[in-house]
Amino acid sequence: MTTQTTAPQTPGKMPAGSQASLVGIPPHIGRALATGGGVLTVISTFLAWTWTAEFPGDLTVYGYPGGLQVLVLIGGALTGLFGLASYGVKGLRWLAPAGADSAIKLSALAAWATAWYTVIAISTKLGGLVNLEPGGWVVAIATLTALIGALALPFDRPAPDPADPDDTGWEQFRHNARNTGVFIKAAFASGTSTPARKLPAYAEILVIVAALALGLTVFTYGIGTEYDELFVGFLITAGFSFAAAAKAGLVGRVSALTAKHRNVTMVGAFIAAAAFPFTQSDDQYATIGVYILIFATVALGLNIVVGLAGLLDLGYVAFLGVGAYTGAMVSGSPSSPFDIHLPFWASALLGAVVAMIFGVLIGAPTLRLRGDYLAIVTLGFGEIFRLAVLNADGTSGPDITNGSNGISSIPNLNILGFDFGQEHTIAGFTIARFANYFLLMLLITLVVVVVFRRSSDSRIGRAWIAIREDETAALAMGINGFRVKLIAFALGAALAGLAGTVQAHVTYTVTPEQYQFAHVVPPNSAFLLAAVVLGGMGTISGPLVGAALLYLIPAKLQFLGDYQLFAFGLALVLLMRFRPEGLIPNRRRQLEFHEEAEAPTVLSKAGA
Amino acid sequence: MTTDTTTKGATPGAPAPGETVLDARGVTMRFGGLTAVRNVNLTVNSGEIVGLIGPNGAGKTTFFNCLTGLYIPTEGEVRYKGNILPPKSFKVTAAGIARTFQNIRLFSNMTVLENVLVGRHTRTKEGLWSALLRGPGFHKAEAASRERAMELLEFIGLAGKAEHLARNLPYGEQRKLEIARALASEPGLLLLDEPTAGMNPQETRATEELVFAIRDKGIAVLVIEHDMRFIFNLCDRVAVLVQGEKLVEGDSETVQGDERVIAAYLGEPFEDAPGDEEVAEVEAAEAQAAAQADAVPGKENDR
């Protein structure tokens, strides 16, 4: 590690006292333990962990890893690789441009948490530790060794904040807790990234392609997890591994590259997403895929309203409903009051336009309000939409929407003779109904991404951000605040309406209950807003990731049952406490929330 | 009480007065029972730098807000180049009056360049469709805007920091950037609200140079300031606002020599304004319009 001068890689040379570690083992032994533990973990995943196939996943076989073992293997391999990188092994240094120590700690944590979760899950599910084969004991010890070794690695001790002796006991306790928090945070802090080596353009693009392929693999794996334990293990491993990669500086480096080649990244991401149905053998997971995509697209549309223009809209799902109802009514469905069957392009356009008109109608009176008032009024309008649709059933009101029965048996789309309801075989791959819609929805997502990107990087996008930052100053700079906000509102509504027309065909039926403020199944206004906030306001990838997580986690963690919403709420509270800017923060946004952090002087074009 | 003692042209070297850019007639602003600005007349001619001074709470910023459409004057009218100003601040900017703020109001999480580009908003037309379709016209307009913004940044000396976040600039440069952002809207009149507040003497001198350079571009300037040396160096004409009323207007000697101005600043009770009545009025008004903080006359006048 010759290039590292800031990160404490060579403990002997650093002055004593400024270094600390969480476990009292000499750092060089710790490093060896971590690296060795990582390697041993990898080996142990090839052993059998349990004797019976009652625990799902192939954990009984010697010779190859299966199920949760694969995840532990990844954690162990990362620990070992980061460990070797910290020794400065040639050819591995690129792994940790910002210092490997924190990355070792986090990846060891990933391996340890996943392995111990597996071991404990086996023991509790099968009733006792006797069900563990030697491999299970080996992996438990190996990951623990690696973790202890990793925690022995040194880091810069933060100067403790001296306590005031006059404080009461409670204040002393809080003070100590705060100091401990700072200390633990410092243990996982990463150094500054070394400047990137100049790569030729094709190599940079290859790196992007590799990163996207990795993303697709991780996503496909997550969607395809078949049992609860595997999904929990997936979340643990993926979360800690991503954190480790971020601490090692890899994420920063890749996002710098993607920011440099934005078009390549976009096309690549699009192709990777389009490849998803081809990796699936049946339509089961394509269903999840298309619902995630609908959810994500609408969340991205909401991100224009919330993330760029700063308008808190709690009734956004109504526009999806307007689009879906419009699409359903002109689809030739027998329960539609209109006996017309428009081609898809016309109904999509109509859905977008009708939603936009609703957006203007709702926005014109409400956008004169600011902040909380706007949120309350949009919440009200969202519910008004649902109730109006519910009552337009011919008895309480005009017969338009069929009331609570909704508009059902919406026929499948047929574009240029391509029937979306049928299976098709493309280049040897069978593409079934939901995969067809997945690909169509992907096109809509692409449209929304392009609209988001182009509008945010323009005169109107700057006006939105200016309004969000300081409305009075923006007005004084000649921005017609009301008009600009109305454009954001109408644009967001039109995009949701566009997604709605596809949604109507995917779900066969549109009913008022699909478009509530809060509901167990996304998309609904609360989940949409949560996806935007969780993913990161003002970014493109943020709501996409946020929506994928928010859809997958409830769908996969069925065993939580009634506690699902509780766990979800708890997770959101924790996220807002520790990472208010979202998982994939916009650079601006991150700076807003972390005033005290040293802000970079130059704002790169990242965060898209 | 409005004594017009303008002595235009008396100062050697002062630029010949051109056409009237700003013409405020009988501007009165009341907040409930409090009259923050009372019957103020003020004209600014092209190529002129006019100062507006007065003790804290004299109504200077309120008067500014009346000029820029943030407040709608209760009485009186404001004309810009002969046309009555619309009562919306973005329309005022479009008409040609740009302003800075007493407490800096930059878009702090946007870059320096983006801040100036926001200032170009009224002078560009590209709407949503052109942004989405990205025709040749869009790219041309964006490039022209960027070029113009970079020119302005060069003019104020921040071209090297175009990609920095506005919040990361040192205080003095933030003030400069605010001026550049206002200039980006191509105003005929620039209103500066305490442009040197919190600056050290060097920065103040640099700002002085900057204001002269702006005047030389043919932009009239109206400036509020507490730094008397700055004002008297800079301004062709100075108006003194005390308790919402214009006391004196004239060149620096006239104003400096006027005993009522000295009285207003140094705290001697001036002829027809005994303290008690005012204090009572102030207290009543404060209770009523506590929110309008900058409209409340300061008490130091009456001490």
Image (cartoon, rainbow, N blue to C red):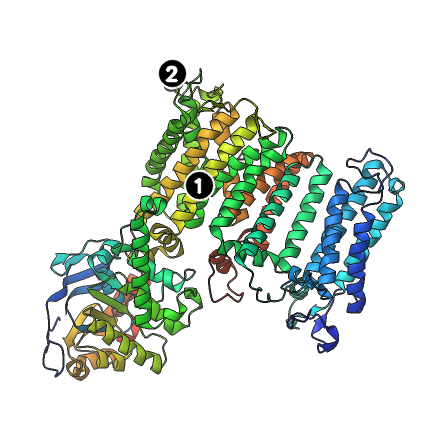
Which mark is drawn over residue A241?
Answer: none
Query: What secondary structure is marked by label 1?
Result: helix
Query: What secondary structure is marked by label 2?
Result: loop
Please give the chain letter of the residue carrying mark 1. Answer: A
Please give the chain letter of the residue carrying mark 2. Answer: A
- In the rendered structure, which amino acid carries the disc numbered 1? Val
Q: Is residue A311 left or right of residue A520?
A: left
Q: Is residue B28 left or right of residue A608?
A: left
Determine whether B47 is above or below A492 in the image.
below
Inspect this view and state whether residue B55 appears: yes
| Residue at numbered disc 1 | A448
Q: Nearer the viewer, residue A547 or B3?
A: A547
Which quarter of the rendering shows the N terminus of chain A?
bottom right
Inspect this view and state whether residue B102 appears: no
When asked about the image quadrant of residue B149, the answer is: bottom left
Q: Position of residue B219 (x, y in %)?
A: 20, 68
Q: Nearer the viewer, residue A25 or A88?
A: A88
Q: CB under 8 Å between callouts 1 and 2?
A: no
Q: Position of residue A460 (x, y in %)?
A: 34, 50
Determine whether A26 is above or below A550 in the image.
below
Q: Nearer the viewer, mark 1 or mark 2?
A: 1
Mark 1–mark 2 distance (CA, rounded to whole Å): 30 Å
Q: Is residue A167 left or right of residue A478?
A: right
1 and 2 marks on the same chain: yes
Which mark is drawn over residue A339?
Answer: 2
- In the rendered structure, which amino acid carries the disc numbered 2? Asp
So how many labels did they put on this image? Answer: 2
